Image (cartoon, grey):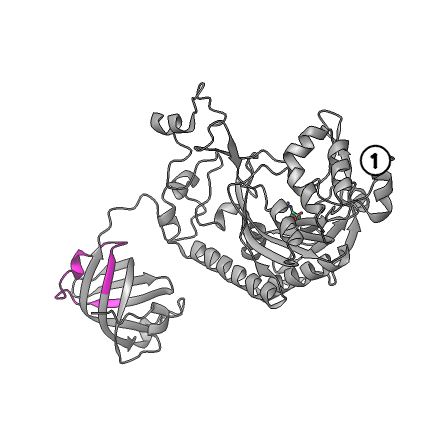
Amino acid sequence: MRSGRVLARDAVHKEGDTVELAGWVDARRDHGKIIFIDLRDRSGVMQVVFSPNISGASDLRLEYVIRARGVVKKRPPAMVNDKIPTGEYELQASSLEILGKAGELPIPVTGDGYDVNEESRLKYRYLDLRRKRLKHNIELRHRVTQFVRAHLSERGFIEIETPLLTKSTPEGSRDFIVPSRLEPGKFYALPQSPQQYKQLLMCAGFERYFQIARALRDEDLRADRGFEHTQIDIEMSFVEQEDVMEAVEELVISIFERFGKRILKKPLPKISYEEALKTYGADKFDPREQKDKDVVGLAWVKDFPVFVRDEKTGALTYSHNPFTAPKPEDEEKLLKGKDLEKLVSLQYDLVCNGYEIGGGGIRVSKPEVLEKVFEVIGHKKADIQKQFGHMLEAFRYGAPPHGGIALGLDRIIMILTGEESLREVVAFPMTSGGGTSVMDAPSEVSKGQLDELGLEIKKAKKKHG
Ligand code: ASP
């Protein structure tokens, strides 16, 4: 028989009705003659009252999964709990079914969990996620994602998936690489971003693209940066810098306002890279004078140099990514190799409360300009052809002017929830040492798997831990 289950939250509208609740035993108070259970489901908790003659009621323990049927009743006034939304009601149970037993839990699942050791929280993430705070964060993330999808779709953007197994993209980070079985000795790279594909989609004529994209970068981990992150990835054709910034500004302001924040200053202030360094000593800063909980300080930073000197090698390298175009007035200089360090790019970054939450730019769409950028940063002609020949070629068959941005979804959710770590807004995050939640990866693979890939492990070296 199909269950006539209602959620705890909705049971309050069913006074006098017989309903069925299902969920976890969140709390249990056994008064001998009567047993009170707080039954928790994804919507909240509801008190269920059992008399001990109901089979199984006295066996119940915390975190058992149960189904209870009974009548929804108003609690006597003295028993009302005004701390919870269902506190005026209870279910007077007439039957009970134990669906899943639970042993003693390795971590508590009530409370906010901040004081629980992180390793245990991630090892038992499926338990950790039972807590209300994390449920709220993950649900909020879902709502933000749906909002973004609707907002962009309504404005003519279409969501397109791009491959995860791909070729290395020079976004300035180390790649995660994946060995190929069919071509032993060759590798795919996991995307540091969908950068090249989204530009190719512009060459294909889609004009307005977005993707809630996973990006993977093998960088040292921090509280606000993991190996994997999710970005709201956007690209537009036939636009100038201001057009992209305007569209993104509308989206970002809508997200924050829709989810309860006030924007410190609208339209968003724009400041040059040079000014940011002078005023704040960095290109990432907090525009708020006071850290007011519900106010977000957003600002654009632009006019970045096209090239900067690498601190270690002293060689010129791109300041953001090699695909960002110089200002039109600087294009000639670039092609002539003049004043290279003074060239200004069409890059823009978005900062929010001290975090960089987005970055993008108008792209180079002329093959000779892109080739020159690679030359300046030290690539040999043959290498450019090998690594980026496909982009140069695509630009030779009619490339529209285009530009875009990537917004860090994880960071936006951190700001909306007030969380200080990425791990609080991702369902299955990594440990600070790069281990996965619950499952023990990275882990060794069998000799057979290595043989199939034509690989041999030299000597396992541990970098961290
Ligand atoms: N690909 C860049 C990044 O992921 C963003 C962009 O320029 O669109 O940081």
Can you tell me whether the CB of the residue at mark 1 lies under 8 Å from the nearest atom of ligand 1? no
Left or right: where 178 falls relative to 352: left
Mark 1, residues whose alpha carbon is within 10 Å: few (<14), some, or many (≥20)?
some
Q: Is residue 51 magenta?
A: yes
**Residue 112 location (% of width, % of height):** 43, 52
Give whichever of 370, 123 is nearer the camera.
370
Look at the picture and state if 61 lies above or below 181: below
Instruction: Look at 43% across and 25% down and name the residue there.
Output: 454
**Residue 244 location (% of width, % of height):** 71, 57
Q: Is residue 429 visible?
A: yes
Residue sticking out furthest to the bottom: 16
Residue sticking out furthest to the top: 459
Query: What kind of residue is marked 1?
Result: Leu
Left or right: where 296 falls relative to 65: right
How many marks on residues? 1
Residue that carries the numbered disc 1 in the rendered image: 340
Looking at the rendering, which quadrant does residue 34 occupy?
bottom left
Quarter of the image for the N terminus: give it.
Answer: bottom left
Look at the picture and state if 51 lies above or below 362: below
Look at the picture and state if 264 lies above or below 359: below
**Residue 216 location (% of width, % of height):** 54, 41
Look at the picture and state if 234 lies above or below 379: below
**Residue 141 location (% of width, % of height):** 50, 57
Instruction: Look at 48% across and 56% down and name the residue there.
Output: 137
Stretch of the chain drawn in magenta: 48-67
Q: Is residue 1 magenta?
A: no
Q: Could you say whether the residue bearing mark 1 is in a helix, strand or loop?
A: helix
Residue sticking out furthest to the front: 397
Q: Is residue 88 visible?
A: no
